[in-house]
Image (cartoon, rainbow, N blue to C red):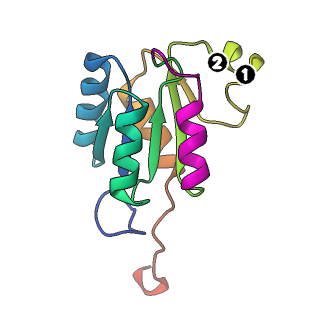
Amino acid sequence: MPYSPHSGQPVVLIVEDDEDVRDLVAHSLGRRGFEVLAAADNSGAEAICRERAGRIDILIADLSLPGEVPGELARWVASIYPSIKIVYLSGIPRHVALSSGLVQATAPYLEKPVNPEVLAGTLTSLLPRAKVASDDW
C-alpha cells in the first residue's frame, strides 16, 4: 500500500454497535493492510481518539448507534482532528441521510452490507499517496 505519512500502516477506527459487523469489517481491513481500532459506541471511540492523540487516519462511523444522536461522533472527531477522513457506513439509505442533513453530499457513504473490496477501495482513495522519487522511473 503506497502510504507513509506516518510510520506504519494507515490507521482506521471503526465505530459499530453490531459486534458481528464490527468484527467482519475489522478482519477484512486488517487483511488488506490497515491497522484497525474498533469501538462499539461513542464513548469507546472517544477514549480511543484521546489515547491515539490524532494518530487515526480514517473514522468509519455508523450513523445509527443506539442512544446516540446520528452523526454526533463524526462531528466531535472532526472538530478535534480536522485532518481525519470520515466514511459513513450505515443501514440508513444514503438519500435519507442526505435529505435529513445527517451527512454532506460529498461525504463518503456506504450502505450496509458493504463489499469488503469496495470498503477498502474507498478508504485507500482517501489516503495521501506516497511521493515517487524522479530517479525511480
Left/right of residue 101 with respect to residue 110 in the rendered view: right
Q: Quadrant of the image for the C terminus?
A: bottom left
Q: How far across and how far down the image is residue 110, in percent?
A: 53, 25
| x 46%, y 47%: residue | 58
| x 73%, y 31%: residue | 105
User: Are the two marked residues, 2 and 1, in contact with CB atoms closer than 8 angstroms?
Assistant: yes
Mark 1 is on which residue type?
A: Leu
Q: How far across and how far down the image is residue 99, in percent?
A: 77, 17
Looking at the rendered structure, the secondary structure element under dot 1 is helix
Q: Mark 2 points at which residue?
A: 94
Q: Against 79, is 121 above or below? A: above
Q: Against 128, is 131 above or below? A: below
Residue 1 is marked as: none
Mark 2 is on which residue type?
A: Arg
**Is there any visible trace of residue 10 in the rendered image?**
no
Q: Name the residue under label 1.
A: 98
Q: Quadrant of the image for the N terminus?
A: bottom left
**Magenta includes 76?**
yes
Looking at the rendered structure, the secondary structure element under dot 2 is helix
Q: How far across and how far down the image is residue 125, in percent?
A: 52, 48
Left/right of residue 118 with respect to residue 82 in the rendered view: left
